[in-house]
Image (tube, coloured by chain):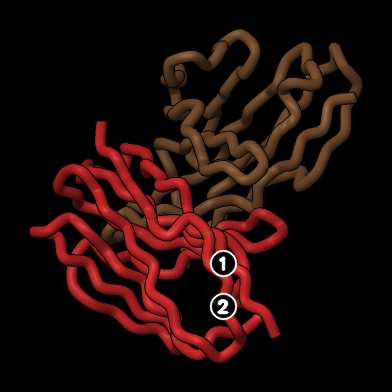
Amino acid sequence: GAVVSQHPSRVICKSGTSVKIECRSLDFQATTMFWYRQFPKKSLMLMATSNEGSKATYEQGVEKDKFLINHASLTLSTLTVTSAHPEDSSFYICSARDPRGRAEAFFGQGTRLTVV
Amino acid sequence: GIQVEQSPPDLILQEGANSTLRCNFSDSVNNLQWFHQNPWGQLINLFYIPSGTKQNGRLSATTVATERYSLLYISSSQTTDSGVYFCAVDSGYAGNTPLVFGKGTRLSVIA
């Protein structure tokens, strides 16, 4: 299947700092990517839809100024958690749908963010 | 929006046992996928199955689109099957719509 790569897999940062997470589609071009957040023992909740060359679409309740999304190329979307606080600690995972054929969704490895 | 319900929420199996996981969805879909989330959080694609039946080794899945449900069968379970199984759907065509996830079934296989 298609490959979506996410980096870093784990990051620890201090309160007040910013953290950037990268999501790359390695073998296909993705005009759209999706960012999800997962709390312990919970399901994946969509945060935002990242659109190449235009602004991201955020789900209700997600602060766009805190979670900055940039989709600068057809293979790369980034999520920056700005002025991180301990409550931002979570598992963040990105997804892209392979446009070659049936648009099956593939997911990155996820990023476990811990804010101390 | 579309709703996805999975059952059971938790399941404990003895190694070698078989199991059936269920996914109900509230509206017609063009995409239904089953995933296994391993202990490290990685989502592994199991099946893309908006309709019909597929098999892959010890796993098989069936989706009855007209009745809005899908089943995932695990046969001869192994400890490595432990983890969370998610069903996710969407009703879009173009691939630019996100999947909506159920709450998952947490499976523990005991040796």
Question: Residue type at mark 2?
Answer: Leu
Where residue A29 sits: x, y (%)? 44, 47
Task: State whether discs 2 and 1 lie on one chain.
Answer: yes
Q: Which residue is mark 1?
A: B107
Question: Residue type at mark 1?
Answer: Leu
Q: Give above or below for B86 relative to A22.
A: below
Q: Which residue is mark 2?
A: B13
Tell me, by letter, which chain the rendering colours brown.
A
Residue depicted at x 25% and y 37%: B2
Q: Give above or below for B64 relative to B90.
A: below
Where residue B35 sits: x, y (%)? 47, 61
Please report whichever mark, 2 or 1, sits nearer to the chain's N-terminal start: 2
Q: Which mark is residue B55?
A: none
Query: Would you call the spot at circle 1 few (<14 residues within 10 Å), some (14-19), or many (20 or more)?
Result: many
Regarding mark 2 in the picture, which secondary structure is present there?
strand
> Is the C-beta separation of discs 2 and 1 under 8 Å?
yes
Asked where in the image residue A83 lies, by quadrant, the reply is top right
Query: Position of A99 compared to A116: left or right?
Result: left
Where residue B70 sits: x, y (%)? 27, 64
Residue depicted at x 88% and y 27%: A13
Chain B visual colour:
red
- Measure the alpha-carbon separation of dots 2 and 1: 8 Å
Q: Which is more toward the observer, A103 or B1?
A: B1
Q: Give above or below for B39 relative to B98.
A: below
